[in-house]
Image (spheres, rainbow, N blue to C red):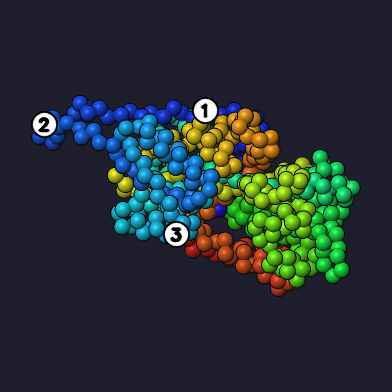
Amino acid sequence: MGTLEWKKYIKHGLILASAPLLLAACTDDAESDTTGDGTQEESSGEAVELEFWSFWGSGPRRETIEAIIEEFNSENDHIEVEYVYQPWGDIWTKSLAAIAGGNAPDVIVQDINSVRQRAEAQQATNLQEYIEDDSFSENFYPQLWDTVIYEDEAYAVPFNTDTQVVFYNKAAFEEAGLDPESPPTTWAELEEAARALDIESGDGWEQIGFYPRWNIGPDVWALNADEGVSWFDEEGNVAVNTPEKVEALEWMLEWQDYYGRDTINQYEAEFGSGVADPFISGLVAMRGQNLNYYTNLRENAPEDLDYGVFRLPEFEEGSGHWTWGGGFVLEIPENTENPEESFEFIQYLTSTDVQERFGMNSFDIMANVEANENLTTHAELEERGQEMYQMAQESLETTVITPVPLTAPDYIPLVNTQIDAAFLGEMSAQEALDAAQESVENLVEQNQ
């Protein structure tokens, strides 16, 4: 995972340069090249055809990316981009097969946390020679840019990201005697608010105030408690069983004991989308979520659902609102024929105007800093949409991205297996994380 402590990179109010202008130098039909025998050969003047793969198969994302590509094609007579949809999940296996078979797409959307694995395996093109502006990296959030660097050179360009926050029902807050404009800021306040929001009904619950594992994993709460340090510290050392992480797991186990494991499992089995969503139905008063959850509420929640959103609470006052984010990058697979034109297309997709347009329609958090800043006050967005981007700006100050370390490519199941054992009552929090620490250390030793 190789987590860096982003305190030294992320500063509130950071001013970054705007995205560079697209350099689209078209080839003129009259332009000629010299052949190997010294004679002159006229360029064909035909457009370079690029194939672009992503998993955006329907809805606003597909509509928006297709419109963006159409616009790019109309503005550039030397490049023609074809969009190819690949289903989620299939895109990863198909891309590996295509790269191995020598027929890979020219540009592909890939997971942000595994860029270095593909770079080391020579599955991605080194983009450094195509980055003509030294300030290009400054267009992106620093923790995102760091994920695309392998041996000090860029192998991808960040496209979008996310951040984990908490949505809450303001009407439920008022009914419980809580101030809806002052949501919890620490774990202690979160627990106090949840108890006030709990409504028992017979042997069950009519309303559950909050349960930390619903949509936010133990890894996120662990790094929140440990000041942004995930399972690996900034030097790359395994940091699974730190005292703060043990305390975080103990805290989560206490929540399970409070509501009861059977109750939690029962409610989870009934969770669904639309009106069956537990936050929309009123079963859960506060729910941890990716900020993009707003799109689900926008489409499915009744108009009278009055809700707000707040940053992941601090472990204790002053420890920081640390949270986690993932995301996607744009890559050029290794050994494709037109990397220069492919990078030109990537520059277009990550430019401020295009990122702003994609974000406005998808409500994704974009990798381009200026685009997100513009969306906080975008005239075409409703007020609540602007509020979501304002929350994104705040939350990204303490959002950690966790690239998978090269020395521990398969470490996540080792950690999760032990944590699951703790939730099943087979181990204490200390025992589980001690066992996970040992397993991951052994994995690192095997891969060094």
Does residue 284 appear anywhere in the picture? no
Label 2: how many Cα within 10 Å (few below 14, some 14–19, many 20+): few
Above or below — where is 7 with respect to 229?
A: above
Query: Where residue 425 sits in the image (x, y, percent)?
Result: 73, 72
At horizontal 36% and vertical 29% (from top left) the residue drawn is 24
User: Of callouts 1 and 2, which one flags the residue occurring earlier in the amino acid sequence?
Assistant: 1
What is the secondary structure assignment of the residue under circle 3?
helix
Q: Are marks 1 and 2 in contact (CB under 8 Å)?
A: no
**In whole angstroms, how far apart are the C-alphas of marks 1 and 2?**
43 Å
Three-letter residue code for mark 1? Ser
The label on residue 90 is 3
User: Of callouts 3 and 1, which one flags the residue occurring earlier in the amino acid sequence?
Assistant: 1
Foreground mark, 1 or 2, reads 1
Three-letter residue code for mark 2? Gly
What is the secondary structure assignment of the residue under circle 1?
loop
At horizontal 20% and vertical 34% (from top left) the residue drawn is 44
What is the secondary structure assignment of the residue under circle 2?
loop
Q: Quadrant of residue 160?
A: top right
Query: 244 and 50: which one is in front?
Result: 50
Three-letter residue code for mark 3? Asp
Query: Where residue 411 sits in the image (x, y, percent)?
Result: 55, 61
User: Of callouts 2 and 3, which one flags the residue occurring earlier in the amino acid sequence?
Assistant: 2
Query: Where residue 276 sits in the image (x, y, percent)?
Result: 69, 59
Label 1: how many Cα within 10 Å (few below 14, some 14–19, many 20+): some
Above or below — where is 291 with respect to 201?
A: above
The label on residue 18 is 1
Query: Where residue 73 sits in the image (x, y, percent)?
Result: 37, 36
**In whole angstroms, how far apart are the C-alphas of marks 3 and 1?**
35 Å
**In whole angstroms, how far apart are the C-alphas of marks 2 and 3?**
48 Å
Does residue 63 appear anywhere in the picture? yes
Q: Which residue is mark 2?
A: 38
